[in-house]
Image (spheres, rainbow, N blue to C red):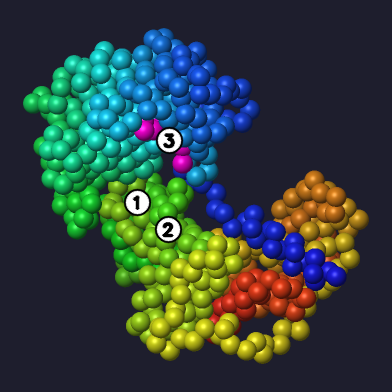
């Protein structure tokens, strides 16, 4: 009975723990404790305060923010749309954010005509920190003193320039380090990503994760003869050399979409190499040469994973010295369903940034397999494990090794492994689960009969943080990460210095495979974990 319960509990736990947290780092004006108002289809003139979408809303008119009024609008992952001249008209101040985990919120003008707008400004200020704004023109500064400040999100111009200043004065500032995309989809020769050809708009772009593009050879940025713009960072579809000040360079790269990159003329840390990280979590570790840096600790690695809105900001996890050269290591973690995803990462001290480097777990593993490196068998088992995790959760295979020379999927063969020694200790008042998110984690649930608030639990001398549960069956749980090379190890959990219970990754695998269950996908995943653990045991080149 306990084994069946463990399997059920584990399956539920795996579902909740596979998703990674969002590390976008946006400044959120609103939070769950703050009172907010909802936007409905009949909403029009907004008063000062915070508004939050709780569903997709199609406006019958448009939202208007009067002069002297400050509004915070949280898109919350939903779409705000209409097909009128504009979705939002600003005279006052709008703080546009998206607090959802998937950052899918949007302001969309669905009109098919060319002179319509996502947001039109008639003076006032727009502070954009997330979401997407889309229209024939994305954002249009029409008249008055207009200030646009962007440090996160996407702006799309579907038929015309994406951000256009028609007014004679104002400012455009793109700062921070969150990804900013400004993309013009229009195909006319007079359409630009950013159009500052009217007036004397004061503008600056200092965000290294800015991406500005326009159709074909159209200018990414069009500026009036006064050239009142300073660009010190970012990626562009056409050259912006004319707007780059002394001390910075606009360089041409091999990137087909954004071939021009602006960086500071300073000696930045250089990428020495990358390697696979197999310490319980799986990811990629970047090594940067810090030998000539006066303040290497000032740098952090900013990474994003394609297909998601996740951003990780990573500090160095250690350093090493080789032949008098100093190297710092930065690790980006992914969950098993993201082994084929591209990690895009750059190093920054907040002012200066390196180029963006693309990498993935699958890239490393495939290279190791093709070149016959010592870790090739481990890489095969790792990708197979990722393949079965993905199959279990979504039915989509992303890391299949079918057709790779010398590789036969052992899961598809006859199961002959005897894991009876890993049955684990059946301790009264406990249930044990395995969590498969970005790390392999063993979790032990305990009833109030066997655990209290004052009890201290440890594994290998490390104190485990005890979490309280509001649950009819269990009052607390503790958990600990297991490295790939220790999947076959049985861990003993100590309670107040005495042996309490034991468990291992293979205890979980044994329980699932030998349970009376028709869940073939889960059983196959557990077999893949077993073969991964065998390969990890055989591999001796651990970092």
In the image, which residues are magenta? 104-110
Whichever of labels 2 and 3 marks the residue nearer the N terminus, that label is 3
| Quadrant in which residue 182 is drawn | top left
Q: Which residue is mark 1?
A: 347
Residue 267 can be seen in this image: no
Q: Nearer the viewer, residue 307 or 128?
A: 307
SS for tag 1? strand
Residue 336 appears at what percent x and percent y? Answer: 52, 65
Q: Are marks 2 and 1 in contact (CB under 8 Å)?
A: yes
Q: Which residue is mark 3?
A: 106
Residue 173 circle label: none
The residue carrying pointer 2 sits among few (fewer than 14), some (14 to 19) or many (20 or more) residues within 10 Å by Cα, namely many
Distance from label 2 to label 1 (Cα)? 9 Å
Q: Which residue is mark 2?
A: 330
> Which residue is at 55% across, 53% downward?
20
Residue 163 forms part of the magenta stretch: no
Distance from label 2 to label 3 (Cα)? 33 Å
**Up/down of 224 relative to 286, above or below:** above
């Amino acid at each position: 009975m306990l084994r069946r319960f463990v399997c059920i509990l584990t399956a539920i736990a795996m579902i909740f723990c596979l998703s990674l947290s969002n590390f976008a780092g946006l400044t959120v004006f609103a939070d769950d404790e703050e009172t907010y108002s909802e936007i409905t289809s009949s909403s029009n003139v907004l008063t000062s305060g915070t508004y939050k979408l709780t569903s997709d809303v199609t406006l019958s008119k448009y939202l208007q923010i009067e002069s002297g009024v400050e509004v915070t609008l949280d898109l919350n992952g939903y779409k705000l749309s209409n097909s009128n001249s504009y979705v939002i008209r600003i005279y006052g101040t709008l703080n546009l954010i998206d607090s959802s985990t998937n950052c899918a919120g949007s302001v969309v003008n669905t009109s098919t005509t060319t002179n319509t707008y996502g947001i039109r400004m008639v003076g006032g200020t727009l502070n954009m920190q997330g979401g997407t704004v889309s229209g024939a023109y994305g954002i249009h500064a029409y008249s008055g003193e207009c200030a646009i400040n962007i440090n996160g999100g996407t702006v799309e111009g579907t038929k015309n320039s994406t951000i256009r200043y028609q007014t004679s004065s104002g400012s455009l500032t793109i700062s921070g380090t969150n990804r900013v995309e400004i993309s013009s989809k229009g195909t006319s020769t007079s359409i630009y990503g950013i159009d500052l050809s009217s007036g004397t708009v004061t503008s600056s772009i200092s965000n290294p994760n800015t991406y500005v593009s326009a159709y074909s050879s159209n200018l990414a940025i069009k500026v009036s003869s006064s050239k009142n713009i300073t660009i010190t960072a970012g990626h562009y579809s056409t050259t912006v050399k004319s707007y780059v000040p002394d001390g910075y360079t606009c360089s041409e790269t091999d990137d087909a979409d954004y071939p021009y990159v602006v960086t500071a003329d300073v000696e930045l840390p250089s990428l020495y190499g990358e390697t696979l990280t197999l310490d319980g979590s799986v990811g990629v570790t970047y090594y940067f040469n810090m030998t000539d840096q006066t303040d290497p600790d000032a740098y952090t690695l900013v990474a994003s994973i394609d297909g998601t809105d996740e951003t990780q900001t990573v500090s160095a996890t250690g350093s090493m010295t080789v032949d008098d050269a100093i190297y710092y290591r930065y690790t980006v973690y992914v969950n098993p369903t993201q082994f084929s995803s591209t990690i895009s990462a750059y190093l920054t001290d907040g002012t200066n940034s390196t180029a963006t480097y693309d990498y993935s777990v699958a890239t490393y593993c495939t290279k190791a397999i093709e070149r016959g490196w010592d870790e090739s068998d481990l890489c095969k088992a790792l990708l197979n494990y990722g393949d079965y995790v993905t199959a279990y959760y979504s039915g989509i295979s992303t890391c299949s090794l079918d057709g790779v020379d010398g590789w036969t999927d052992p899961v598809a063969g006859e199961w002959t492994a005897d894991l009876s020694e890993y049955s684990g200790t059946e301790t009264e008042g406990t249930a044990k689960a395995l969590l498969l998110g970005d790390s392999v984690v063993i979790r032990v649930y305990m009833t109030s009969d066997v655990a209290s608030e004052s009890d201290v639990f440890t594994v290998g001398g490390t104190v485990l943080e005890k979490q309280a549960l509001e649950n009819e069956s269990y009052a607390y749980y503790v958990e600990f990460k297991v490295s790939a090379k220790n999947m076959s190890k049985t861990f003993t959990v100590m309670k107040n210095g005495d042996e309490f219970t034991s468990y291992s990754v293979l205890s979980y695998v044994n329980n699932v495979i030998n349970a009376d269950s028709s869940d073939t996908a889960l059983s196959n995943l557990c077999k893949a974990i077993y073969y991964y653990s065998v390969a990890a045991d055989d591999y001796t080149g651990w970092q």
